[in-house]
Image (cartoon, rainbow, N blue to C red):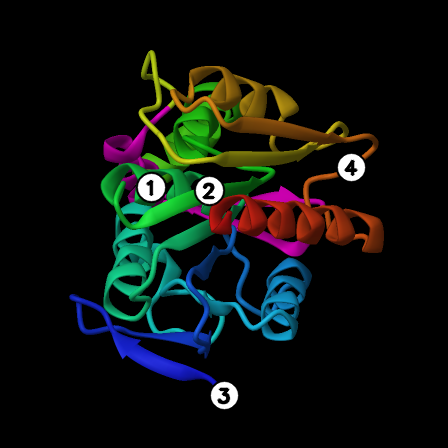
Amino acid sequence: MIKKVKTINKRKISYYHYKSNSKISILFCPGFNSDMNGNKAKNIYKWCTINNIECLLFDYSGHGTSEGRLLDLGIEEWTEEANLLLNSILKKPSIVIGSSMGGWIAINLALKNPSKVCAVLGIAPAPDFTEKLWKKILSKKQKANITKYGHINIQSDYNPDGYIISKKLINSGKKFLITNRKKIELHCPVRLIHGSDDKEVNLNNSIEIFNKIYAKDVELIIIKNGDHRLSSPNNLKTIVSTLQSLVERILV
């Protein structure tokens, strides 16, 4: 059953919460323009219910069934929402899983809550993607249109309607950048999963994160021929088995 919680900005965001007496909990942070009904989220939730592990999925504001207008929102709001759920609903040490943009948010949550986040699992993580969009991908005309109109629509292989890229999205990411640091001060176990054929977020992003994370227990799993979504049955099996081994690692 979908539940609702109010953010500090009075928006209601939607979430699923499987409660259990497990010693740890799982928080799943979806990607940009994705929601808690995606294949990865549903498979992780199913695995948690089968194994009696507390789990929480949610929709960022402006996504899925949560309130809010996408044009008015960005990384700051979505990180605050994830942090609210992590600290107000999940009372146990948590493994934070993040897909694409959610991987960026998951790392920031772990940096902000080192005593609460016991592990991070990034699936095709896209840290600082807003900055990379602005500096390396968007054309001069696209950037001019964002400045003039406040947003543009860009094409995507994964969404026939394209993605809205707003000035708010670009600007809100600046205070959460992590790849500009010499070291990413994470001390918990970290697992990164990335497809070798990811055309949306290059594999080099995960390699860069892998090399900068301070923790010693860090693994990068590269899925040969894997795309950005990593939603094929074999890809999902790899994600779940990685989560299972991470849970076992934490509970030892």
Counting labels gives 4
Image point 50% across, 48% down: which residue?
A: 98
Label 1 amino acid? Ala
Identify the residue position indicated by label 2 in the image: 120
Give the CA separation, mark 3 to mark 2: 26 Å
How dense is the environment of label 3, judged by Cα within 10 Å: few (below 14), some, or many (20 and up)?
few
Label 3 residue SS: loop
Instruction: Report if residue 149 is visible in the image.
Output: no
Which numbered dot is residue 226?
Answer: 4
In this picture, is 185 found above or below 25? Answer: above
Q: Quadrant of residue 124?
A: top right
Label 2 residue SS: strand
In this picture, is 126 found above or below 78? Answer: above
Which numbered dot is residue 110?
Answer: 1
First reached walking from the N terminus: tag 3 or tag 2: 3
Which numbered dot is residue 1?
Answer: 3
Label 4 amino acid? Gly
First reached walking from the N terminus: tag 3 or tag 4: 3
Magenta stretch?
A: 151-178
